[in-house]
Amino acid sequence: MSVPVEATPIPTVAPEEPAVARGIVKTLRSGVGQGGMLLALLLGVLFFQITTGGIMLRSLNVTNVFLQNGYILVMALGMLLIIVIGHIDLSVGSVAGFLGAVVAVLIVGVDVPGLGHIQTDPILAVLITLIAGGLIGGFQGWWVAYLRVPSFIVTLAGMLLFRGATLFMLGGQPVGPFPESFRAISAGFIPEAIGSIPDPFGPKDIVLANLTNLPVFGDLKLVLPLGGDSLQLTTLVLGALLCAFIVFLGWRSRREQVKYGFRVPSVRQFWIRNALVILGIMFIAYRLAGYKGLPIVALVAFLLIGLYMFVTMRTVIGRRIYAVGGNSKAAMLSGVNSKLMVFLSFVNMGVLAALGGIIIAARLNSATPKAGYGFELSVIAATFVGGASAYGGVGTVAGTVIGALFFGLLNIGMGIMSIQIDYQFMVQALVLLVAVYFDVRGKSRDA
Amino acid sequence: MEAAGRVSDVLLEMRSITKEFPGVRALKDVSFSVRPGEIHALVGENGAGKSTLMKVVSGVYPHGTYEGQFFYKGEECRFAGVRESERKGIVIIHQELALIPHLSITENIFLANEQTTRGVINWGLSHSKAKALLDKVGLDETPDTKISRLGVGKQQLVEIAKALSKNVELLILDEPTSSLNENDSQKLLQLLREFRAQGIACVLISHKLKEVESVADTITILRDGAVIESLDAQSEHVTEDRIIRGMVGRDMTHRFPPREAKIGDIAFEVRNWKVAHPVYEDRMVINDVSLNVRKGEVVGIAGLMGAGRTEFAMSVFGRSWGRFVGGQVLKDGVEVDVSTIPRAVAHGIAYATEDRKTYGLVLMSDVKTNITLANLGGVSHSGVLVGPKEIRVANEFRDALAIKTPSVKQAAMNLSGGNQQKVVLAKWLFADPDVLILDEPTRGIDVGAKYEIYTIINRLAAEGKAVIIISSELPEVLGVSDRIYVMAAGRIAAEMSAAEASQEAIMKAIMRLARAGAEEVVL
C-alpha cells in the first residue's frame, strides 16, 4: 500500500463494477486451488508480454508454447502419478530418448542379413514403441514395487541404462529423416474442416499501457496483440465446445454439491469464474486459429489432460493411487493392492515417456543420441511447481498443466528476449525453488 | 490453594494462559502452579488441553503464540523454543518417544548436547557420563547399545536419563506409561518417587487414574481447556471415581452400555494358528492359537503388551504381519483363503487397527474418502466413482456414528482422536464385514467417546456380526465382551465366559502361563 511508486503515469483499466472485480480477484487468488500458481502464470505472461514488446502473445509464439513443450506436458502427467504415489522417476528423459531411437529405427528401417532392408509402417512403429514404453515402465516398476528397491535408485540406474541403450541403438549416429505422416505428430496441425475467415480485428496492436523510464528495461509498452492473416474456424469451434463442456461439468457438479448441502460459491461467483476460464480458453484458441490452427501435439496433450483429470478424480484406480501415496500402510490394510498400484504407475509413466520420445523424435525429424538429456528435470520441476507434494498423496492434473505451461512460457519468453541459455537455467532454478517454497508455506498455513 | 506469588514455595506458576488454534480455543484462562519437588498429576479427557499446556511451558509453543504469562523460579519466562526451556531445567518427554533407533544410548542421551573436547566428540567422557545416568535411572545396559534393541520400557528410561543429563528440575512426562506393561510402569513410578526425594518436581500427564492416585501429591483436572479443580492428594483421600467425576463433569456410573446378547452359530474360527517373527524366523510369535466367535457375539482378547494379540489379528487378516507357518481359518464352518488382504476382505473379514494414524487413515484425505476406501466398489460403477453416492454413503455414516465434523469433506487430520476412530470404524462398517476385529478401539480417546464406540459395537453384534475386541484395558474387555480369551506369550492362556471373568482371573491366567513357559517368553 504505502510502497513508494515510480512517479510515472500508469493508466489503468477503466474501473470495473466492484463486486465483479472482487470476484475476479477471489478467483485468481484461489488459483483454481493451485496455490496461486495460476496467478503466477498470468503474471508471467504479463511480464513477458511487456518485456518482449508485445511479441510474446503473437499467434506464432502461443503456438510455439505448445509445439515446443508438448512432450513435457505429456510426460508430466505420468510423473504426477509417480510423485503422488510417493515415488520419483529420474529415467524419463533417457527412456524417452531411447524410445525415440526405437521408433526411428523401426520407421527408417534396418538392414537384416538375408531379408534386406526392413521398414515398419509409422502407425505400427508408434504402437510398438508405446508397448515397449509400457514394458520398460513395468520393468522399473517391478524393481520398485515388488523387489522394494527405492525408486530413486532404480530410475537412476534406468537413466544410465537407457542412455547407454540409446547410443547402442543408434550406433552413435542420428537416425532420420522421417516420412511426413510421422512428423505431423509434432509439426502438424489439425486439418481445417470448416474454412477460414479474415481476422475481423485486422492486424493491429492495442496499447494498454505505456511504461516509460523503467529501471533496466527503459521504455516499455503493454500491448494486446490482435489480428493476423486469417482465422482457422475449426480451432475456434473446438475451443467453444471445450468451454461449453467445462461450464456444463462445473454446473452439474455445483448442483450436486448444493443437493448434499455443501457450501458452494454463489451463482455470480460461479459465472465470474467460468467467464475467466472461457476468456482464457478462447484467447488461446483465437491465437492458435490465427496461425495454422490447433497443433496435433496440443490436441494429443489436451485429450490426455482430460483423460487424466478423469482418472485422478473420478476412478477407483485414481483414488487408490492417492490413498497409497497418502498412507501406503493404511491403504494396504484397507485392501488396496499398494504394490500393484505402484507397478501400474510406472507402466503408465513408461507409456507416456514413449509418447514423449515419439514427439521429440518427430519434432527433430531424427533420433539423436543426445535426445532426452535433462528432460527428466523439466518434467519433475513442472510437476512440483504445479503443487505436487514431494511426500506423496498430493497433486492435481490442473496444477501440473499449469506448472508445465509455466516452464514453457519461461523458455519461449526468455528465448524471445534472447536471454542466453546459461541465464535461462539459473532463472528456471530460482523459479522452481521459489514456487515450491510458496507452495509449502501456503500448505503449512492451512494445516 | 495457597496464594500465588510467593517465590520460595512455587517452582512454576502459570497465570491466565489462553491458547487458540484456528477455530478452537485449546486453553481458556488456565492458571496452574507446581511446587518444588512435588509430583503433580495433570488429568483430563482427550482434548482437555493437558499436552497443550505443557507445550507452552516447554517452549514448543513459543512466547507470543499464547496469551498470559508464566514464571519459573519467580522469573518470567518467554521461551522462543525448547532449547531455552531446557537450559532452565524444564524437560518434557513426549508421548511418542523422540529417540533415534539406529543410534546408541550414549548418542541419544547427548544428542544436540555432544560431549566434546575442542570440538571433537570425547567418546570416553560421553560413555562414562551416560553410564552414570543409566545407573541413576536403574537401567542395566551398556551405553553403546543401540536404541532399537531396547524394549519400550527401557527406551522410556533412556529418555529420562537424557532429561537428567540436562540438569532437570522440572520433568514433564506426557503419558509415560501408556505403552508400558504393569511391571515397567511400576518401576517408572518408583523412579519418580526417588526424584521427588531428590527435589526434582514432576508433572505427570496420565490417563491411568490408578497410577495417578498412587503417586501424585497434587492432582489438577482439566476439562475443555479450563482448570476444573486442583486436589491435594496427600491430605484428602482422592478416589478414581472422584477424579472421573471432575473429568467428565458427571458421575460415570455406567461406563458401558447395557448389552443383551443374541448369540448364534459359530461364524468365524481360527485353528492352530502359528506365525513366526518376520525377521527371526525361528522365533514363534503366535503359537498354536485357536479361537472362535459366534454370530452376534462380542469376544474379547485380553493380555499384556507383547502378548501377540495384534500380531495374531494382523496375521489372520491377509497375513499382514509375520511369516505364516500354519493354521486354518474357517467361516461358517468352511475353510477360507485369507492369504492376502483383498481376499480376507472379500470373505467378509475386517481388521480395524490399533494405530489409526499410521495404519488406519489417510490423514490428508477427507472423511468421505477414508470411509469409502475399503469398499470403493460400493460407490463406483465399472471402475468410475459415483460422486453423489459416495457423499450419500459418507453422510449416512457420519449421522449413524455421530462423527463430529463440519462436513465429510473435512480432512481426517482435523478430527479429534475419538472421531478419527469412528471414521476407521465407518470405513469397515461400509465394507459390511461379517467378522470385525477391533484392535484397541478406544485407545487414547475420552470417556464420552468410548461409551459411543461401545454402543456401536453392541449394535453391530445385535445385527448378527461376529466381533472380536483386542484391548489392554481389562475393565473394557470385561465390560463389553460375552466371552474372553486371555493371550500371553503368543498362546491362548485361558478362555472364560463373561460371568466367570474378572481382572484377578485374567491376571492369574497370564501369570500361570508365564510361569509354565518362562523360557519361551521373549521380549
Image (spheres, coloured by chain):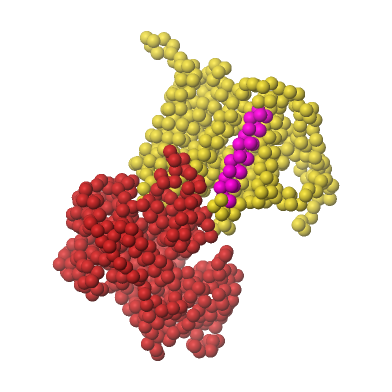
User: Quadrant of the image for the C terminus of chain A?
Assistant: bottom right
Q: Colour of chain B?
A: red
Q: In this view of the protein, which residue sits in the foreground, A361 or A285? A: A285
Quarter occupied by residue B258: bottom left
B59 lies above or below B321:
below
Q: Is residue B91 above or below residue A28?
A: below
Q: What are the residue bounds of the magenta stretch?
A: A235-258
Using the image as rendered, state which of residue B367 and residue B188 is in the foreground: B367
**Residue A252 appears in the figure:** yes
Q: In the shown orientation, is residue A278 left or right of residue B255?
A: right
Which part of the image, by quadrant, shows the N terminus of chain A? Answer: bottom right
User: Toward which corner of the image does residue B454 lie, by quadrant?
Assistant: bottom left
Residue B321 in the image: x percent, y percent?
A: 29, 52
The answer to whether residue B101 of the structure is visible from this angle is: no
Q: Is residue A3 above or below residue B96?
A: above
- Residue A247 location (% of width, % of height): 63, 40
- Name the residue: 57% across, 74% down: B18
